[in-house]
Amino acid sequence: MGNGKKPDGTKPLYHSGSADKGKLLASFVLDLVYPRRCPVCHDIAVPRGRAICRECLDKLVPIHGPRCFKCSKPLSDREAEFCYDCASKKHSYDRGISIFPYGSVLSQSLYQLKYHQRQEYGRFYGRYAAACAGEQIRLWGPEVLIPVPLHPKRMEKRGYNQAEIIAGEIGRILQLPVDTKTVVRRVNTKPQKELNDKERRSNLRSAFAVRQAKLPWKKILIIDDIYTTGSTVDGVSLALKAAGAEQVYFLTIAIGTGFC
């Protein structure tokens, strides 16, 4: 990972200078006042100081085995190159990667992140993603990370964008810049979970815009929490490519496995 920190938030033992000791002391005091919650069980992480309970860490199982060449969904057929979704329709992005299959543990965890002020979950998943996908990200060579933006009304109501939190942690670890100003969400779309596949695509066809006439980057990595049909990523990618991006990739924390 390059920063000596493991995905669970703990650090190896090392001899630190005064600056490091100051940071560790500040972190210790902050944890006493605002103890971190485990992103799996949602109780105070045990032992204290960790980002996730030692036992709960085993319940987070990253995707392994064959994946779709385009979106990285897990494949049951080892001979297949693409999932049903990617084989049957064209996406505007080039390729993507997700860390976990979207199941009950992730659905509850990401719901808490998005709607119940659990920003620490976003930082944890950002670290996990950097550890699991850092090598692939470096191979793609993006010049910038762009989190999927929220509409201003939704941002005002929620107070934060979970994709920005995840992107910020990935960018910090992999030393990549994060841009939160260039892409805007100009339509306050309906929640994607309430729509079918056709409605999702229509919902997001013109939802995003780029503020600059021409982008300063050619390779861009979009960051979001969940990938289901790819409609959101496609919407952002279309806007970016229309403004001059040549290659657009994505990373999400979770990806659906059964949506066609």
Image (spheres, rainbow, N blue to C red):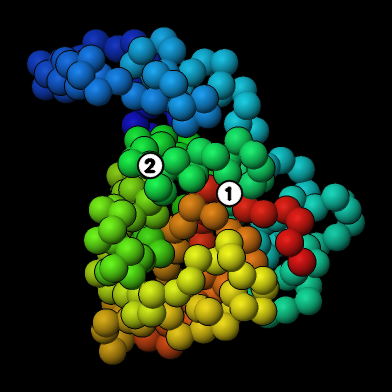
The number of numbered discs placed on residues in the rendered structure image is 2
Residue 211: where, in percent of width, then height? 27, 82
Residue type highlighted by circle 2:
His
Viewer-side residue, 171 vs 203: 203
Q: Would residue 162 be found to the left or right of residue 75 on screen?
A: left
Viewer-side residue, 59 vs 71: 59
The relative height of residue 63 versus residue 142 in the rendered view (above or below) is above
Identify the residue position indicated by label 1 in the image: 254
Residue 222: where, in percent of width, then height? 44, 63
Q: CA distance from mark 1 to mark 2?
A: 18 Å
Residue type highlighted by circle 1:
Ala
The crowd level at tag 1 (other Cα within 10 Å; few <14, some 14-19, many 20+) is many
Residue at the location (59% across, 74% down)? 200
Residue at the location (36% across, 38% down)? 118
The crowd level at tag 2 (other Cα within 10 Å; few <14, some 14-19, many 20+) is few
**Mark sitting earlier along the chain (1/2):** 2
The relative height of residue 186 versus residue 53 in the rendered view (above or below) is below
The relative height of residue 230 versus residue 157 in the rendered view (above or below) is below
Which quadrant of the rendered structure holds the C terminus? bottom right
Residue at the location (37% across, 86% down)? 243
Question: Is residue 208 visible to us here?
Answer: no
Residue at the location (28% across, 58% down)? 157
Identify the residue position indicated by label 2 in the image: 116
Viewer-side residue, 129 vs 165: 165
Q: Secondary structure at mark 1?
A: strand
The relative height of residue 178 versus residue 206 in the rendered view (above or below) is above
